Amino acid sequence: MFKKIIYFLLILVINISIAMAQSIKPLEYIEMYKDLAIREMKRMGVPAAITLAQGILETESGNSDLVKKSNNHFGIKCKTSWTGEGVSHDDDAAGECFRSYKDAEASYRDHSNYLRGTERYASLFKLAPTDYKGWAIGLRKAGYATNPKYPDILIKNIEQYNLQQYSLEAAGDVPKIESDKYQDDKEPRVSKPEKETIFDEIAAKFSSAKGNSINSHKYINATKGTSLLAIATENDIDLSKLLAFNDLEKDGILTNDQIIFLQKKSKTGDRDFYVVQQTETLYDIAQKNGIQLTSLLSYNTLTQTTDVPVGTKLYLKPTVQTQQANAIQAAAENTFATVTEKIHSVQPKEGLYIIAKKYQVSVKQLREWNNLTSDNLQIGQQLIVSK
């Protein structure tokens, strides 16, 4: 009996340790979503510092049950105007309806639309976008939260984690929007997939009809057990091209439901970055965003076998750093090729005349390029033969 108790306690400690190890820290949450907050500030004018402070509070830094089952980062309830999916969650009352999103990006976007498009928050947009204290107090007064300490918590988060730097970064690009003329620009309704797979998520976003596109490239939803040759034949595409379009090396039968492109994918995505979700491989992400796998790997300095953790931000376009790195690599490769082409190793019985004739240059040029004071050469001597 004593051994069973010890065993139970040991298992409990291990489970608690694992849970703690997997929890997201506030600074990790900020790093994951700061770019989204900045982008939304530039799009709708909601201060990035406020957005991040709310996200940290409402999701418990990305660890709350609500955000895990709905991607709802801001605790926005369904309300009568919501036409998307929802989940049941206990809050002020048991079993309340909260909005559900396909990913964090959709939640951040809806948060901005919600504040900009709701009349009771209109006064907030008359404040300076860098006035985080005014925004924090204003949100509470407008009824965003019932907790009287809500403004204090937001202000503490902003000051503790220096979130104001992100508002300052975007302050010069805040749009001028007349609240009385604003119209909500929500993304189309996305049905919540019953089974969380890449194929189901894509199918929920787009209909299965032929002619759908991702990143402006046509694709079809192919089911498990379908032959790639059959897809190529049905769509009048050469099999080798179909394989190349989809970063596949050989023909065969699909082992999973997946999207198959009927056109060559782009080297860049239609947005700057993508945040890795559960069960996704790098190949899945490339297909999901309609981008060539080699480009995705290059922008993020990865290999196809790299294990990328959930929440990692992957660039879909070349950053300044990757452009510089690629330029340096290309220059190094070009320099190496150029150097090897212009150097000649002297062989037995070779003289300047034979070498000059071989490379179609003059003996005088060989002497000048190599600072030769005589025509005597040594076997293995390295000569510059072109400039």
Image (spheres, rainbow, N blue to C red):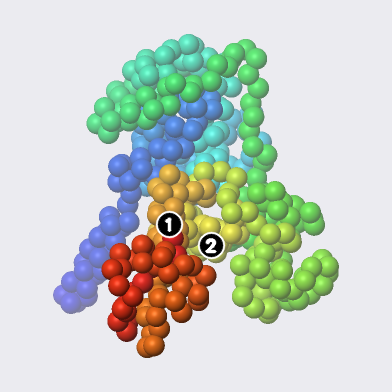
Inter-mark Cα distance, 1 to 2: 20 Å
Quadrant housing the C terminus: bottom left
| Residue at the left extreme, as displayed | 2
Q: Amino acid at mark 1?
A: Ala
The residue under the point 30% across, 72% down is 374
Disc 1 or 2, which lies upstream in sequence?
2
List the residue tagged with mark 1.
Answer: 331
Q: Residue 134 versus residue 144: which sits nearer the camera?
A: 134
Q: Which mark is residue 176?
A: none
Q: Amino acid at mark 2?
A: Thr
Q: Which mark is residue 294?
A: 2
The residue under the point 33% across, 66% down is 370
Above or below, 61 relative to 236: above
- Residue 213 image point, x, y percent: 72, 51
Secondary structure under tag 2 reads helix
Answer few, some or many: residues within 10 Å of disc 2's Cα (few below 14, many 20 plus, some between 14 and 19).
some
